[in-house]
Amino acid sequence: MKLNVKPKCAVFLIIHLLLCLHSYAGEVSYKVSDITGGIISISASDNMNWIINPDRTQYEWVGSKYAWGLGFLSIDGVKHSWDHPSGKTRNTLIYRTGNIKINIKRYTDNGDLVEEYEFMNISGKTVALSDIGIFTPWNDNYPDASTCMTSRCNAHVWAGGSAAWVKAMRMNGHGPHIGMIVTEGAIDSYEILERDKKKGLSNFRGIITMNVPDMKIESGRKYKLSWRIFTHNGGDFDEKVINRGGVIVSAPKYVYEKGETAEITFRSARETKTIRQKITRIGEIRMTYKYSEGRHTWADILAVSGEDKLIEKRADFITARQQMDNPADPRHGAYMVYDNEGDSILSNDFGRSDLDEGRERVGMGIFLAEYYKKNPSAALLESLSRYAAFIRKLQDHNYKTTSNVRRQTKNRGYNYAWVADFWFRMYDITGNKDYARNGYGTMKALFRQFGHNFYCIDYPVTTGLKALGKAGMTAERDTLLSNFRKVGNGFVSRGLDFPHHEVNYEQSIIAPAVQFLCELYLETKEKKYLNGAELMLPALEAFAGGQPSFRMNGIAIRHWDGYWFGKRQTWGDVYPHYWSTITAGAYHYYAIATGKTKYQELAKNIVRNNLCLFFEDGRATCAFVYPKRVNGEKTHFADAYANDQDFALMFYLLVNN
């Protein structure tokens, strides 16, 4: 169909043809912009909009050009976009950008919204299309906990080729939820747009954009991509994907030791096929399944020399390469950030607080103290003793704890629990009562400074009470337990109304609360604490998806830590992020409290997948920025800094011991 109309008539035609109709798809309803033709609302039998409304009211930087279904591409290296249709035939919108005509067709089928994107070459020559992105602005952001519970989603993206999908989960974990499955064509990666320090900081995930593979299209030929959007209740997601022609990929685990046999199962409506492969080399391995002509998907697995070997190499590297050994430096004995590109300790002369010698770096000390229990050596104990002397420099006589020896940083609550946990573990391996006293004094300072309403990461419930009891400090143990009860009572009282901390709402607020309540239940046997944990559990589970990749499977969404802790300071999804292992800690203690072994297996999966942050030479990375691009910049890389990732190994030892 050829349109030949005057500009004023064209405007009238677009308004008349597109309208701004609320189109109901049975279970899925959607609303289309009368200007751009992009979708501005998707809902599922309630008032929640599962996508960001591109009218600048939710976020001023998300305007009409980011409506669902609009996008961009490069034609022979020249970038173009589509954001205003030139016409419509029946239920198909027509866009033209360069010499490519894009037809977008939408209709409803058995309660699903079906979208078809057709890219047609209308030039007289073959063209190369690259960097193709379609905006899918899932409403994945953190205004506050109460809003998040019912009006925001965690969007789990699997860009798995012909069987790509998105599992969007309401943040409270209770359905109905929304899913998306590719039925024709492919999505092989995704990217993130509109991330910036001035654009939501850590509280805005960005505009999720699906990438179509690069291709060449001959004159008059076309490429078609189709997907279906449907409702699900979480547990039925896999079956709904399969019933719509998709493939669900699964494995008993995604990290293997060299010499083992990997086993991946591909399940579709036509067949269930299991592929086995002997692991003969170390590194990343993609296992691919071709299930029909031109259609394929895969699983990503990691092969390591050995899990214990990897951890041993990391422990050796920290003590040999990451400990400040200059007696003239006030940080003498500290475990420092390591720059893998510079192959040296980072002095942090530029004063970035997220690179200070205290803070999350205490995770190295905690890990090594725990590692020492089964791997004692004089050299390791000497290193830990020097580190303990440094840690005391971060504290004054009343145990006020800072992030660096200059004591020029804000009073940060997390520091106290981490340092106290380190002290208690040092007592456990040495029997030196001063360490137990230091741990207790640090916890007293935490409650004195921050009260009992702080959702702290790594409250040392089990380690602290055990150490004080073993040291014969009965009164101190009773006092600490009394303080823990006050914290637990507050957590139970607030329920899902989580307060904001350094981020408005995040997995590392809720996961530590679940773990804390489970540990407190195990100490007291008071059922209210376990009930409180179980109330939070669905919201915690909603943070992680089932993508068949060692980087993503069971790993909670986090999308800012490459900026705050990385060398390149890149925003965007971090998979895995080591704090995902707090979820493993929560599952571990919940399994002990209830006997539900399923959660212990989930915990093992999380900590095992986090081993990809550690390399065979003992080095590590604080962040793997997963998307293909962020703000147009190429990503999908491991950051050069070994910074705060070693807490993952502490949780690995917890879960596996």
Image: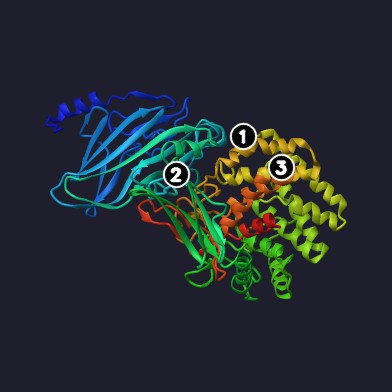
Image quadrant of residue 179? top left
User: Which sits in the foreground, 335 or 39?
Assistant: 39
- Which of the labelled discs sits on residue 247, or is there none? 2
Give the residue at mark 1: 497
Q: Is the Cβ of the residue at disc 2 closer than 8 Å to that at disc 1?
A: no
- The crowd level at tag 1 (other Cα within 10 Å; few <14, some 14-19, many 20+) is some
Three-letter amino acid code of the residue under disc 3: Leu
Please name the residue shown 17% across and 29% down the image.
10
Instruction: Name the secondary structure under disc 1.
Output: loop
* Residue 428 occupies quadrant: bottom right
Alpha-carbon distance for marks 2 and 3?
38 Å
Q: Amino acid at mark 1?
A: Asp
**Amino acid on which disc 2 is placed:** Val
Residue 33 lies, in percent from the top left, at: 32, 30
Q: Earlier in the sequence, mark 2 or mark 1?
A: 2
Q: Which comes before the other along the chain, label 2 or label 3?
A: 2
Q: Residues within 10 Å of mark 2 (few under 14, many from 20)?
A: many
Reading the image, the residue beneath label 3 is: 517
Percent coordinates x, y for residue 187 in the rendering: 37, 47
Pinpoint residue 147: horizontal percent, then vertical percent. Answer: 53, 33
Look at the image and tell me whether residue 413 can be seen: no
**Which coloring applies here?**
rainbow
Q: Nearer the viewer, mark 1 or mark 3?
A: 3
Residue in view at x 73 percent, y 43 percent: 595
